[in-house]
Image (cartoon, rainbow, N blue to C red):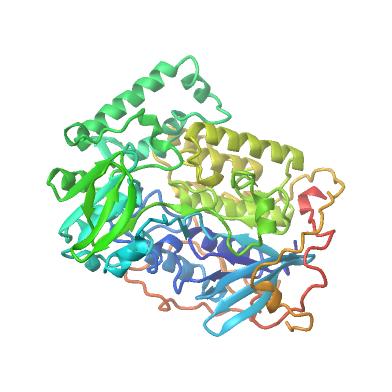
Amino acid sequence: MTSGNRIAIVGAGIAGLSSAKVLSREGFPVEVFDRAPDVGGVWSATRRYPGLRTLNSKYTYRFSDYAMPEDYPRVPDGAQMQAYLEGYVHQFGLRENLRLGTEVVAADPVDSGWLLEIRDETGVHRTSCDHLVVANGVFSEPEMPDYRGAETYLARGGQLYHSSEFLDIEQARGKSVLVVGYGQSACDIAEAVSHVAAATTVVARRLLWKMPRKLSTGLDFERLFLTRLGEAHFRYHSPRGFERFLHGAGHSFRDTDFDVLQELATKKLGLRDLDLVPEGRFEEIAQSTASIATEGFFEQVRDGRITVLRDTTVTELSGTPAGCAVWLSDGQVVPADIVVCATGFQQRVPFLTPYIQRRLTDDDGNFRLYRHILPTEVPNLTFAGYNSSLLGALSAEVGAHWTAALLRGRLALPSPEERSEQIDTRLQWMSAGTGGHHAHGTTITPFALHNIDEMLADLKLRLPLGTRLAQWFRPVKPAAYRGLWERGQRPAEPTPPEPPAEVAPAPAETHPATAEMYPPTAEMHPATAEVRPATAEVRPATAEVRPATAEVRPGSAEVHLGSAEVHPGAAGVRPGSAETHPAPAGRYPAGWRDRYPSQR
């Protein structure tokens, strides 16, 4: 792709913003769509539940070239994270690339790219792009149970929410609250509301192991999840070096380490006294996600402010003149004015047609993405943030550079058959290791460093040996990756050209809103200096680039939407904002497969 090719990014969370910054620096005109009125994704004020905070510290959950403010606590809360991302937008001049409050409701492939149907406060419009980046997030579509009796429960005054919809803690004051689930959001919400609610109950179908933020002096959870030694304790699909020893002849050392961690966590959290010891081994803590103990949760259980009902499920909601209640599978009936379902999310892309979605996933709904980025059968499309982990910001940033190299022809890809085989191997390994709990192939916990290493290897980049050795024993420092990207600007040796595969035209299946929107006649850390993007605006080839030589930190936590100054720059046209495009003659032409530059 050339610098004139337009890129649309769907989602203004961590992955979308890092993609916008990297790709705009590569010279691509970039436009970012998000239906929320602010940036942040899961950190947006429109989705921020009480008690939301980062799992790891501000020193590890950050971009390589943008540190969190020094006055932030070690573990920032949701509002501080959103302010951090607002600061990122301001620092790198991305404001003009954003179209907030704008939802992409349909995206249809055409021979030259994608035709987008978008909705904002003025109505529904069309625009187009040459390449589409899906950064809608794997935690964007709530998974809401369909409980029997819900209508009666609501009619009698009961309140039913998904965790991403329960935003105001004052709603719980003086009420009886029941939280469904035992994951991170369930425990966060339960702990927060227990301070104001009359009663707080957690219904847990299955108890999970929880890792205290700090086990003992010098030993915290980041040393298990964010070091190479800790990561090596979990079995990867292709172990290497010392990992082979830990999972082979040295497995007794590994098993002993997990036994010690399990006992430390059990004692630290008082799980035996509370009858909350989970079944299974402690190493299951990393099945698709890291489960960190919410600070204060078990103390509130011990004090009687939170009641945990284990090994049971909700079967029915009821509402009577006497009050609202929840019926459980073990026969218990629990009074509940408010029910909050912390039941997870669906991993899907709702604005793509069913035809395209089938080409992205296997029969089980798992996304078939090479490096969690590149589809095997749909051209002009990449994903960002579908490698969820505790190093989400750094993983997304490295992934954005991987995508940039792909589009610029600097990436030498394996053959489609090899990529497909690698994807199948990974998905089979994930299913076997997690019992199917791997968010349809979109999460990489606890293997963030493996994933980053693989992307860097594709880019022909490698951290200095000293840095890699330090990562075996000390948590990863994202700043160590700053400046690596400038080393990978040389074009890669392309793979031999291959005959394009025939792609059959799509069946006569259209997105529900598309047919009426497109009538035939419609108009249409080695470096010590950080390199900042010149601007968020699309600049001509001769535009001046402003390198920065000092790290600039975001302002205080009180950064408000719209308060950031927009950097002036050369005039540019944002894709789709000033022109319309005629509808294509055919929705899925037979020759629509694209061959990336590295495959020519």
> Among all residues in the image, which is located at the extreme left?
303
Is residue 239 visible to us here? yes
> Among all residues in the image, which is located at the extreme front?
321
> Looking at the image, which residue is at 38% across and 56% down?
147
Q: In the figure, 364 relative to 267: above or below? A: below
Q: In the figure, 49 relative to 103: above or below? A: above
Compare residues 325 and 102 and report the one nearer the observer.
325
> Looking at the image, which residue is at 78% across and 83% down?
521
Is residue 576 visible to us here? no
Expressed as whole percent of the image width and height from the top left, the position of residue 275 reads: 21, 34
Q: Is residue 450 left or right of residue 149?
A: right
Expressed as whole percent of the image width and height from the top left, the position of residue 63 reads: 46, 55
Give the image quarter of residue 119.
bottom right
> Among all residues in the image, which is located at the extreme top?
249
Q: In the figure, 48 relative to 447: above or below? A: below
Expressed as whole percent of the image width and height from the top left, the position of residue 150 reads: 35, 61
Q: Quadrant of the N terminus?
A: bottom right
> Among all residues in the image, which is located at the extreme right?
499
> Looking at the image, which residue is at 81% across and 69% down?
586
Q: Is residue 135 left or right of residue 542?
A: left
Expressed as whole percent of the image width and height from the top left, the position of residue 548 reads: 51, 64
> Looking at the image, which residue is at 80% across and 65% down?
111
Q: How many marks?
A: 0
Compare residues 180 and 583 and report the one nearer the observer.
180
Q: In the figure, 570 relative to 489: above or below? A: below
